[in-house]
Every structure is written in structure tokens, then in C-alpha cells.
Image: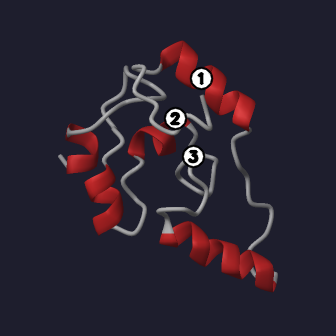
Amino acid sequence: MSAAHKWGNKPYDRSIAPSQNIGVSIANLGEGFHNYHHTFPFDYRAAELGNIFNPTTKFIDLFAWLGWAYDLKTASHDLVTNRAKRTGDGTLWNRECA
């Protein structure tokens, strides 16, 4: 079991194993926001932060700017906020989404 599935907060869905782990995110170029990713699997950013601690999203954004990546799906602010309030563990640290 990976650290992103074992340690961290669960701000979007407290009933699933994947968690938010900032250490994993930094070490793996933004891939530690597992609770978000598993709650909103269609969001290409894999995190509510957009591309701020997420070089992988910046990379995809570059290819979107070039026209090589398109039809990128994201979760709306309202969807993220409502889901966190309904099923999250109350640890949402990005208050911009709360």
C-alpha cells in the first residue's frame, strides 16, 4: 500500500482509502492528492489546486496550449465544495474551495 493510500487527510471522501499527502505530492510531482483524484477521477488536474504544486498539470496545460491536448475535464468549484461538505472529513485546507 502506498503512502498516498495510507497516511493523510480525506477532505473529499472519508470512506475511501486514498488520502491527501503533501509529502507524496512533492516527491511525485503532484501525484499525492489521491483523495481528490479518486473522488473526481475525470478531472485531469488530479488536484483541486490546479497547477500550483502540480508540475504534471502544468505539463498537460503546456500541451493544451500547443493544441496537442484538448477536451480536458475539470470538476467545478461548486461540485468540489459540495462534495467536501457532504462526504469529507472536514480537513479541507484549501479554503478557496470551501
- What residue did someone put label 2 on? 39
Mark 2 surroundings within 10 Å by alpha-carbon count, few (fewer than 14), some (14 through 19), many (20 or more): some
Which sits earlier in the primary sequence, circle 1 or circle 2? 2
* SS class, disc 1: helix
47 relative to 9, above or below: below
Which amino acid is tagged 3? Answer: Glu
Query: Image point 56% across, 44% down: which residue?
Result: 41
Q: What x and y, as percent, mark residue 42?
A: 63, 47
Colour convention: secondary structure
Which sits earlier in the primary sequence, circle 1 or circle 3? 3
Which sits earlier in the primary sequence, circle 3 or circle 2? 2
- What residue did someone put label 1 on? 83
Query: Image point 79% across, 69% down: which residue?
Result: 70
Label 1, label 2: how far apart the Cα atoms are: 9 Å
Q: What x and y, as percent, mark residue 22?
A: 32, 52
Between circles 1 and 2, the one closer to the viewer is 1
Which amino acid is tagged 1? Answer: Arg
* SS class, disc 2: helix
On the image, which quarter does residue 51 sit in? Answer: bottom right
Mark 1 surroundings within 10 Å by alpha-carbon count, few (fewer than 14), some (14 through 19), many (20 or more): some
Which amino acid is tagged 2? Answer: Thr
Query: Image point 49% across, 45% down: which residue?
Result: 37
Q: Which numbered dot is residue 48? A: 3
Q: What x and y, as percent, mark residue 61?
A: 68, 73
| Callout 1–callout 3 Cβ contact below 8 Å | no
